[in-house]
Amino acid sequence: MKRATAIISLLLSLTFTWITSRAEVANDSVSLSTVEVVAQRPFAKVIPAQELEGRRLEGLNSLSVADAMRYFSGIQIKDYGGVGGIKTIDMRSMGSNHAGVFYDGIQLGNAQNGQIDLGKFSLDNIEKISLYNGQRSEILQSAKDFGWAGTVYIESRRPRFNDNEHYHVNATFRTGSFGLVNPSARLDLRLNDNLNATISAEYTYATGKYHFRYRKVFEDGTVAWDTTATRHNGDIHALRVEGGLYGTMHRGSYQAKLYYYDSERGIPGAIVNNVWKNAQRQWDRNFFAQGRVRKSFSSRYTIQGNVKYARDYMRYLNPDTTLMYVNNRFTQHEIYASVAQRLTIIDGWDAALSVDYQWNSLDASLADFARPRRHTLLAALATAVSIGPLKAQASVLGTAVNDRAGNDKGRATRRLSRLTPAVFLSWQPWKEHDLTLRAFYKRIFRMPTFNELYYTDIGNATLNPENADQFNVGLTWHRDFNSTIWNSIDFTVDGYYNEVTDKIIAVPKGSGQYRWMMMNIGRVHIKGVDITASLETSLAPDLFIGGRLNYTFQRAQDYTDPSDSFDEAGSYKGQIAYIPRHSGAATLNARWRRLQGDYSFIYVGERYHNSSNIPANYEQPWYTHDLSLSYPFTLDRCTLRVTAEVNNIFNQQYEVIRNYPMPGRNYRIILKFDI
């Protein structure tokens, strides 16, 4: 904590020292920074994205990217509770390993287990979050962008300046329940007319302690136990530091980013067998450096290059010798390079070719660990055609993987290659109406992770990749009103069918209860509907109200073993674990003059924690209501915004993951200072 406090203090000190040195030459009138939103109309994209940005993103009572993504349709977040709890994403029930997460255009990787903890990315430095099912409509992108069933694009805040501005400063301080102390600061610099820089830092501390109700009821309605306890060992110390350069050149742009994250957190564990406290801990140190350049040599030819180096260190400690003492360390390295080119053949017809190379390694302190090395080569050929109201895209991705792994007992090499196609269509039948019909098909696969293949005594080096087929049909309707009251309305609906085969699951190995092996025996069929609707109104000259509603229906069934349907506890055709049939979210934003209020509601319907959909595995629905109020104060050339938040207003006791109780009612106060 001392190291983090020192870094934050140094950043703030340098920031205000630099501001003081600039004060004499600064213009007396400095306007507040603005964010320009440049976007196509919904029907201009073959497959539109769900997006959160600007005021909508600020008003969600969200601390991290994972919290904000709960408001997208078709999304399930696995949340293990508290500020420091690990949070991963599942898109349309296909599993978190089928979702690609990109930060400023380059993928966040984790070859060890495929899990990206979205809780590590704070909203303080995020400008926009976009969610695409299938893939983006842009064909000038890296080959890795084509390689996922769905993608999440996180865009960090970029420096933007008016003519007479040379710097912007933002400092934020959050405090509230769970012992939360969360200062952050960001400095944007205008180095010259073509180059801007930014540096940001954030420190998070929380005790993670909160009260919860622990209650169990038998099938006959009798209460087994009902008590109130305190969640322990959920503390976190985390430091995030980022720096970026953003430049422009003739018919092009470039950017570079450095990122560092250092955390120590407790793992509170599951509440089972009257065990209320756990001692497991986890340390993470993540670093990456990445860059991107894009250049148009003519109106018809553009090239883009990406490079990245990443190092991830993780230590897991379980000091409880009554179970099994564990003190494991893992270190990953990644090197990545990509070149993409787009050529306009004739007006309305583009083609693109992308080639990527990636190298991954994993070292661990485990005995007899295989220490795998993976070389991945990807090539994507894509085309986009626009003929009047019809837009179409098609792509084919070629993937070649070469794994080398071994230890003193032997070494092995494994090679694999696949071709996976995708086709997207969009049609606007009437020019005078903003109604668009769309459809897509995509086949994709995901490689087994290093843990699934090579983890000592559990991994299975003969695993095949998981395969997924996606079918989607939908429509988008947008209307602007020529009215002083009604501004606009948007509506989207998508029906989809996904099939995952060769799904990788853990099965018992031999007769030992604690011996498992990864196997390709899973099969899942997913049918669903996603609906979104939004409305903006101006009921009075000073009163603006905007609302958004998301709803998802999913029937995600386990088709793994037909013989597992002859008894009451069979899992064949059962809803897969933790996937609700019904879920949704609603947000409401109101602004009156300078006062802003935000309300949000999340609902997750009944689920089962096992594909055997019997009463013993039943999980109750849960919902939360959140509310916030904010008001800005102008202080000379500065703005101070004060925000008060109340989350889970009605103090509902619930669990996202069985035996991992979530917090009840909690509070936050946020002070945000801008120059």
Image: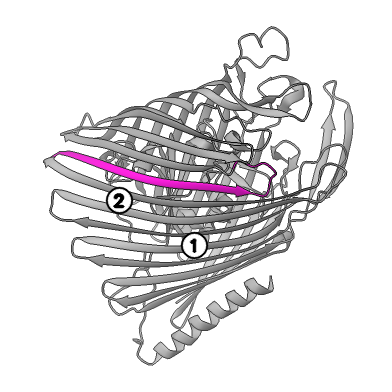
Q: Please indicate, yes or no, whether residue 432 appears anywhere in the rendered image.
A: no
**How many residues crowd mark 2 within 10 Å: few (<14), some (14–19), many (20+)?**
few
Q: Quadrant of residue 264?
A: bottom right
Whole-angstrom CA distance, mark 2 to mark 1, is 27 Å
Please say whether residue 362 is one of the residues in the magenta stretch: yes
Drawn side of residue 388 relative to residue 140, left or right: left
The label number, if any, that marks residue 39 in the structure image: 2
Q: How is the image coloured?
A: one colour
Q: Amino acid at mark 1?
A: Tyr
Q: Nearer the viewer, residue 504 or 250?
A: 504
Horizontal and vertical percent position of residue 31: 36, 76
Residue at the spot 64% in from the left edge and 42% down from the top edge: 369
Horizontal and vertical percent position of residue 486: 36, 47
Q: Closer to the observer: label 2 or label 1?
A: 1
Q: Label 1 belongs to which residue?
A: 259
Horizontal and vertical percent position of residue 503: 55, 25
Q: Amino acid at mark 2?
A: Ala
Q: Answer with mark 2 or mark 1, whichever residue precedes in sequence.
A: 2
CB atoms of marks 2 and 1 within 8 Å: no
Drawn side of residue 248 relative to residue 411, left or right: left
Q: Secondary structure at mark 1?
A: strand
Q: Quadrant of residue 422?
A: top left
Q: Quadrant of the N terminus?
A: bottom right
Q: Quadrant of residue 145?
A: top left
**How many residues crowd mark 1 within 10 Å: few (<14), some (14–19), many (20+)?**
some
How many tags in the picture? 2
Please say whether residue 12 is one of the residues in the magenta stretch: no
What residue span does the magenta drawing correspond to? 347-370
Q: Is residue 150 above or below residue 540?
A: above
Magenta segment, prevailing SS (helix, strand or loop): strand
Horizontal and vertical percent position of residue 275: 86, 43
